[in-house]
Amino acid sequence: MSARTLVIVAVALATGFAAGITAVNVLDDSAGDPASTMAPDIGVALPIEQYDAFTDGVITFAEVDTAAEAVRQCVDDTGFTGYTLTTTEVDGWSASYDDGIESDRDVEHCMTRHFRATHDVYQWQKLQG
């Protein structure tokens, strides 16, 4: 029997004044669905936007880079300019943005929604060797 589980992620906002709760995905808990266990195994919630990267059970750097591009697009869609997210296989990622971005809450939302789980599991896989 296959159970469906709603994965909820609490997103702590950078300001520390509020928290948002986002229902991010309904996953198949069957043994044939690696995405249902990979991220939760290391304590990471899996937003639906990142689900496809997990379906084959292996996160590649190309999938991390695709996730980073989704973050850049998400930030652009908020109307902010001057945001840079760089990924490398060796160093992971780095981000910077202009002072014109009044709130990093939107940036953090984009990172959580499109990138963090994919990147974190990729790094975890590298450590597992």
Image: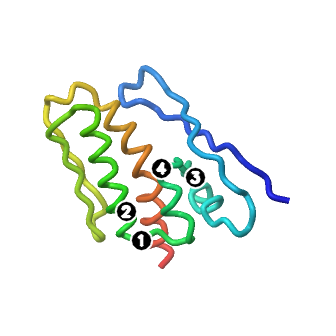
Q: CA distance from mark 4 to mark 1?
A: 16 Å
The amino acid type of the residue labelled 3 equals Gly
Residue 71 horizontal side relative to residue 127, left or right: left
Q: CA distance from mark 4 to mark 2?
A: 12 Å
Look at discs 4 and 1 and give the one toward the viewer.
4
Q: Residue at x 16, y 37 (%)?
A: 81
**Disc marking residue 43:** 3
Mark 2 Cα shell of 10 Å, populated few (<14), some (14-19), many (≥20) = many
**Disc marking residue 64:** 2
**Disc marking residue 14:** none
Nearest the viewer among 35 and 43 is 35
**Disc marking residue 49:** 4
Residue 15 horizontal side relative to residue 27, left or right: left
Q: CA distance from mark 2 to mark 3?
A: 18 Å
Do callouts 2 and 1 mark residues in contact (Cβ within 8 Å)?
yes
The amino acid type of the residue labelled 4 equals Glu
Q: CA distance from mark 4 to mark 3?
A: 18 Å
Q: Quadrant of the N terminus?
A: bottom right
Q: Residue furthest bottom?
A: 129
Query: Considering only order in the chain, which callout, 3 or 4, is on the residue closer to the N terminus?
Result: 3
Which secondary structure, mark 2? helix
Q: Position of residue 102 (x, y in %)?
A: 22, 25
The image quadrant that residue 40 belongs to is bottom right
Q: How many marks?
A: 4
**Disc marking residue 60:** 1
